[in-house]
Image (spheres, grey):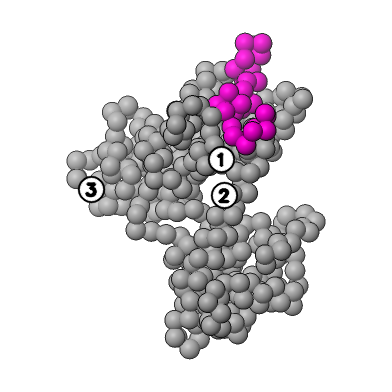
Amino acid sequence: MGWCCDVWIPLYLEHAQIGKMRSVPVLFLVAICASWVMCKPTQEKKDRVHHSKDLSDHQHDDDKDFQYDHEAFLGKEEAKTFDQLTPEESKERLGMIVDKIDSDNDTFVTTPELLAWMKRVHGRWVSEDVNKQVLLFDKNHDGSVAWDEYSNQMYGHLIGEEFNDVPDKDTYRKMMKRDERRFKHADKDGDMIATREEFTAFLHPEEFDYMKDVVVTETLEDIDKNGDGAVDVHEYIGDMYNAENDEPEPDWVQSERKQFLEFRDLNKDGKMDRTEISHWILPHDYDNADIESKHLVYESDKDKDDKLTKNEILDNWNMFVGSQATNYGEDLTRRHDEF
């Protein structure tokens, strides 16, 4: 039995690197293709900063479209479903959602209520993702995932002695050791069997305070090219931008250099240590959902009373749920009962 690439690539992406707000990490995509054909590891640029759980993969640019707002408000999968609805259907379902958000039934939606809704939506996404991966790796169906279950399925066909024709075995061994370290960190009782909560910490370490140290370690390993245990400005820029043919640096790269000097290197010693890296990738004063909830209220609050009526939300339905042309080409029939 073989696994196809479109199963394994998203799976590894979910736990290999997380967060997409700003800068860009290097990661390997592990994949096993059908009929045991190996996918070569590749490099992909992702954002390093784990402000909070990502609300959308799209850029937040309301002048271009509202896709970021849609995914922030509905969740990524439900936003796809809404993209297939007529405006009338979207408005009707939005009205039902508003009734759910108004938790105190006072006919108004406040910023805290909207924030609670979005956190629920995106918390559900994490839960559903973990459910899928527990089903994939929990071979003895005991509700937990042992390290042996995970490593055998993830790496057994990559580093096993019987598969001598697999290239880059050393790379995969290093990746497995890195995963094992994260697994041990998530496994609080040290029995190498992850409960559902521990497996969630393994897959989504940005969600758990006790996993922050391992996130910093992984970031440092990716960027620290000279092995001095810190990140200098050249390593910082090199992680997100590689100049070609002596081309001039884009303005955003120059801005990042300034950001490093003024805000990343807090003690001004020319490099970021572990504490400074933690401040960078795991800031405590930034919450995507909080900012987005305030943004939606601000854009829809016509009478500026800092709360929304159902009519104000429906009048601005396009920002919340408006249908858009998509490229998914899917027959999306999913409907959430809770909506």
Q: Amino acid at mark 1?
A: Arg
Q: Residues within 10 Å of mark 2 (few under 14, many from 20)?
A: some
Left or right placement of residue 134 versus residue 188 in this view: right
Residue at image mark 3: 266
Asked if residue 144 is among those painted magenta in the image, a careful observer would answer yes
Residue 301 vertical placement versus 247 (above, below) = below
SS of the residue at dot 3? loop
Residue at image mark 2: 126
Q: Amino acid at mark 2?
A: Val
User: Upstream in the sequence, badge 3 or badge 1?
Assistant: 1
User: Upstream in the sequence, badge 3 or badge 2?
Assistant: 2
Q: In the image shown, does 15 or 270 lie closer to the viewer?
A: 15
* Residue 318 circle label: none
- How far apart are the two marked residues, 3 and 1, measured between alpha carbons? 38 Å
Residue at image mark 1: 196
Q: Quick check: marks 3 and 2 in contact, CB under 8 Å?
A: no
Residue 131 vertical placement versus 214 (above, below) = below
Residue found 46% across the figure and 42% down from its top: 205
- How far apart are the two marked residues, 3 and 2, measured between alpha carbons? 33 Å
Q: Residues within 10 Å of mark 3 (few under 14, many from 20)?
A: some
User: Upstream in the sequence, badge 2 or badge 1?
Assistant: 2
- How far apart are the two marked residues, 2 and 1, measured between alpha carbons? 12 Å
